Image: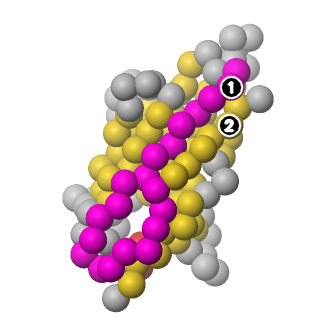
Amino acid sequence: QVQLVESGGDLVQAGGSLRLSCAASGNIFSINSMGWYRQALGKQRELVASFTSGGETNYAESVQGRFTISRGNAKNTVYLQMRGLKPEDTAVYYCNALFRTITGHEYQTWGQGTQVTVSS
């Protein structure tokens, strides 16, 4: 059983900053990729930012230059530093991990989500 626990969502004014955290625990042998997705009300879930075990990062065009994804010293943690927040960034943010167990099986799992609300 693998769990992703997110934190850091909050209500913030436009132009403000937030840092989201996600910690993975459980039967993880290695993590292939971790990332953040978001889902605004009435919209589909979309990728915000991700990184692979090889060090590649990927950002949605809408957050490029404002958001930074990073890995914690504990390798099973990931952060999303968000700056210059805009009302359109309002959404539930979900942590995602693609990982392997010691048996070599690959799985994907999601966190429960954390609400980010940006007021204008």
Horizontal side of 100 relative to 81 (left or right) equals: right
Query: Which x, y percent locates residue 89?
Result: 41, 73
Name which residue lies at 38% across and 34% down.
71
Give how far apart the Cα atoms at labels 2 and 1 are.
Answer: 6 Å
User: Magenta stretch: residue 16 in it?
Assistant: yes
Q: Which residue is mark 1?
A: 26
The location of residue 6, given as percent across then percent down, is 55, 49
Q: Residue at x 70, y 31 (%)?
A: 2
> Is residue 50 shown left or right of residue 106?
left
Return the residue nearer the eye: 56 or 93: 93
Q: Main secondary structure of the magenta part?
A: strand
Q: Nearer the viewer, residue 12 or 32?
A: 12
Image marks 2 and 1: residues in contact by CB distance under 8 Å: yes
Classify residue 3 by image quadrant.
Answer: top right
Q: Quadrant of the C terminus?
A: bottom left
- In the rendered image, which quarter contains the N terminus? top right
**Residue furthest out toward the right:** 1
**What amino acid is labelled 1 in the image?**
Gly
Residue 72 lies, with reference to residue 20, above or below; the image says: above
Would you say residue 115 is visible in this rendering? yes
Which of 10 and 14 lies nearest the eye of the viewer? 10
Going 45% across and 25% down the picture, which residue do you hit?
Answer: 75
Residue 105, given in percent of the width and then of the height, sits at 73, 20
Which range is magenta? 8-27
Q: Which residue is mark 2?
A: 3
Left or right: 1 as drawn, with respect to 91: right
Q: Is residue 53 left or right of residue 112?
A: left
Q: Which numbered disc covers residue 108?
A: none
Badge 2 crowding class, 10 Å Cα cut-off, few under 14, some 14 to 19, many 20 or more, is some
Q: How many marks?
A: 2
Is 22 a magenta residue?
yes
